[in-house]
Image: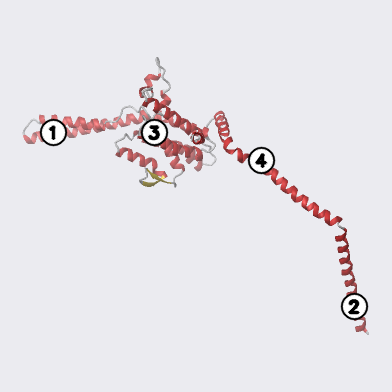
Amino acid sequence: MVNQVENWYTNIPIITRCILTISAIMSCLVTLDVLSPLHLYLNYRQMWAPKYQVWRLVTHFFFFDRLSINFVLHMYFVYFYCTRLEEHTFHRKSADFLIMLVFGMVSMMCLSPLFTFLMNTLSSVYHQLFMMMMMMMTTTNGGTDGTDGSGVTGGTGGSNSHHMHHYQPSSTNPFMSHSLVIMMLYVWSRCNPHERLRLYGLFTIGAGYLSYVLLVLGMLMGMNPLNDLIGILVGHMYYFVNHVLVSEYPHMRPMIQSPLFLRRLLNQQQQEQLEPELEEEYQEEQQQPEREREERQEEYDVVEEENYDLDHNPQEENVDHEHAEESNNRTLRRRMQEDYENDDHVE
């Protein structure tokens, strides 16, 4: 049992394995109250002097939740789709896969304040319009009833504040692990658009629509769509730059590539990981030329033996010589017979 778990764990691609391991460790520590989420979320003020908590730049991308259903679902998405992405689209290119994740993290941290500002601006505009409409309705009701409308105004104001509190978006985006998962799902779905998936065992969809279906389901469950929108946008940016442009202009090279030293490092680790799995195949490949040489040598020996027997077997030589003499004699008798018949015809 232990060996099976160890083999399963070591067979996971290296980048996916690191993501799963870091996320599981952080969730276990937070669940056991050894670590607090307050030390993991993105807070730019805590990263500078005097605290210098620079690990926040990375940890908020790998903490999904405490040990719960939400954590299990995210780990399933990471294991299933991230493994497929690294094994197929980025086969033997784990360095490029890592650079894609780095590109996604940097882009998300740059876009998150912009998206938050836009969402807050739209929320503020919506708040002002809603307040103006309620004031107009209150004024109209007050003038019609002949009252000052104070009671109506007070009641409406309370319901209005509660309503606006429900629709007020978050002013910060402390954890962007969900956005990172959505970005990987989007890139995988665009690289495999014709694959069919059964989501949650309920209905079947095309892989190209996976990210959008998850966005709609999250909104129906009352989740903030900001994280999904950021993940979809960043995933589309990467796919457009490294796949669409390259397919449209074949002379172009992918713009987002890994450095040479990182490719050498990860490729060497991949080879070390694959050596136990491919050792038997490698030995068979090495033994195959020897087997072919042995087979060719055996065929050559057989042919040589046959030639030797033909050249040095006196009985066969005598038989061949007798056959040759008989054929010559028959030829001579036939010619003599033809000459005799010709002479008789002339006479």
Q: Give the Cα separation between the discs numbered 1 and 3.
A: 42 Å
Would you identify the image quadrant in which residue 105 lies? top left
Q: Position of residue 21 (x, y in %)?
A: 45, 30
Task: Tell me if label 3 and label 2 are in contact, CB under 8 Å.
Answer: no
Query: Helix or strand or loop: what does disc 4 sit on?
Result: helix
Residue drawn at x 35%, y 31% is: 115
Residue at screen point 39% across, 33% down: 179
The residue at 41%/44% (across/down) is 208
Secondary structure of residue under mark 3:
helix
Q: Earlier in the sequence, mark 4 or mark 1?
A: 1
The disc label shown at residue 337, or none: 2
Q: Residue at x 56, y 33 (%)?
A: 273
Mark 3–mark 4 Cα distance, whole angstroms, equals 47 Å
Find disc 3 in the rendering and name its residue: 179
Q: Nearer the viewer, residue 141 or 316?
A: 316
Q: Position of residue 342 (x, y in %)?
A: 90, 80
Disc 4 designates what residue? 286
Q: Residue furthest bottom?
A: 347
For the residue labelled by badge 1, is the local secondary structure a helix, a strand or a loop? helix
Q: Is residue 236 visible?
A: no
